[in-house]
Image (cartoon, rainbow, N blue to C red):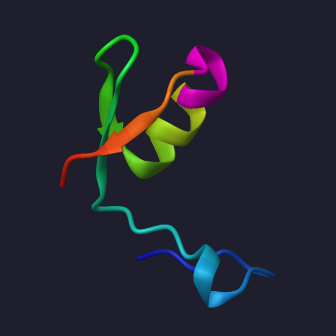
Amino acid sequence: MTLIRGKSADDIICENRVYKCLGCGFVGLEREADEHQVKCDNPMELIK
């Protein structure tokens, strides 16, 4: 788990969460999924 400085405990990014893009089928870890969602603009689904 990674704690980002200046953020509250609610904003901790869990490196082990895997998301799937419901638009194009992209699958990636939370950080990759956040970056992908900015480009693809489709909802992401938590799969793990």
Give the side of residue 24 with respect to residue 11, left or right: left
Above or below, 15 relative to 3: above
Residue 28 on image: x %, y %: 32, 36
User: Quadrant of the rendered structure where residue 14 is?
Assistant: bottom left
Above or below, 10 relative to 30: below
What is the count of numbered marks?
0
Residue found 60% across the figure and 82% down from its top = 10
Give the farthest residue toward the bottom: 9
Give the farthest residue toward the top: 24
Quadrant of the rendering where the N terminus is positioned: bottom left
Above or below, 26 relative to 4: above
Residue found 35% across the figure and 23% down from its top = 22
Give the side of residue 39 with respect to residue 1, left or right: right
Give the farthest residue toward the left: 48
Residue 21 on image: x %, y %: 37, 26
Give the side of residue 10 with respect to residue 6, left or right: left
Above or below, 19 relative to 25: below
Foreground: 17 or 2? 17
Residue found 66% across the figure and 27% down from its top = 38
> Is 9 contained in the magenta span?
no
Residue 45 on image: x %, y %: 34, 41
Magenta span of residues = 37-41
> Is 38 contained in the magenta span?
yes
Q: Please, what is the dominant secondary structure of the magenta stretch?
A: helix
Residue found 46% across the figure and 37% down from its top = 33
Residue 18 on image: x %, y %: 27, 48
Give the farthest residue toward the right: 6
Quadrant of the rendering where the C terminus is positioned: bottom left
Give the side of residue 27 with respect to residue 9, left or right: left
